[in-house]
Image (tube, rainbow, N blue to C red):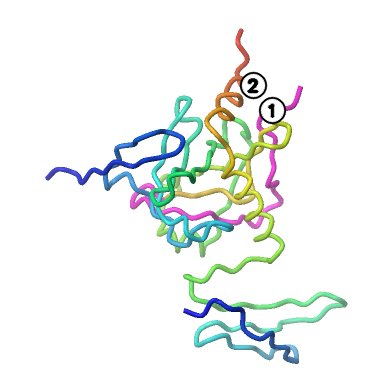
Amino acid sequence: MATSIGAVLVLTRRVNQSIMIGQDITITVLELRGDQVRIGIAAPRSVSVHREEVFAEISRQNKMAAGVSTDDLARLARRRRPPS
Amino acid sequence: MAETQRQLETARFGTLTVTADEIVSVPDGIPGFPGFHRCVLVPVDQSMFWWLQSIDDPDLAFLSVVPWPFFPDYEPEVAATDQDILGLTDAADARVLCLVTVHRDPDRFTANLLAPVVVNQRDRRARQVVLDQDLPTQAELAPPD
């Protein structure tokens, strides 16, 4: 399996024109408004589609979450329910 | 017929005995951990918290929390595509868990409400879904003193 990142491709598209990625992913430019672009994505359900910055943020949170230890949980449990 | 049992060595819990019907599949992995495909749910603290212990990586476990005791107004709306992927037809089959993060201040804990892990309890299939709602990825679990 190729692990390198392929070439970056730059294409020009007009509104309502599409790009195919492989056989079954279609990306369509729906609307232009100022500096915003509305994009439609049709992809098989096995393909996850995320806004890049949201994916990056969740990825970052998950990496932080993977560092939680059982000691951390014990501390959290104590804080949540202080001894009476 | 006896359930297939296996011993699972883990960094946090020592040896766990896991039966095949306890294994949760995470077909797509989760962001940052694309290889996190199988885990077992380990309940703690009267099932208010659950560890998601990786089957394949003994060091990898995520602490998660049942959100509602902490965030009673939390109303996750799982997108139709995510429901399809999970094969969820009844909300009662969904177990919703939010991953917990500890911060540099070790007394600060937060839960990710934007991207909960949803488990279809019927077939133990799970996915970290991203909600199309204005929710924090760091909701305070234990307010700092």
Residue beneath label 1, please? B107
Q: Secondary structure at mark 1?
A: loop
Which dot marks residue A79? Answer: 2
Calculate the distance from the C-alpha at mark 1 to the C-alpha at mark 2.
Answer: 8 Å
Please tell me which residue lies in front, A23 or B56.
Answer: B56
Q: Main secondary structure of the magenta part?
A: loop
Q: Is residue A13 left or right of residue A46?
A: right
Q: Are marks 1 and 2 in contact (CB under 8 Å)?
A: yes
- Say which element carries label 2: helix
Task: Identify whether B84 is placed above or below B121.
Answer: below
Where, by quadrant of the figure, is residue A12 drawn? bottom right
- Image coords of residue A37 (percent x, y): 77, 77
Give coordinates of residue A73: x percent, y percent. Answer: 56, 29
Residue B142 lies in the magenta stretch: yes
Residue at left 52%, top 49%? B117
Which quadrant, please, contains the N terminus of chain B?
top left
Residues in magenta, as a range:
B120-145
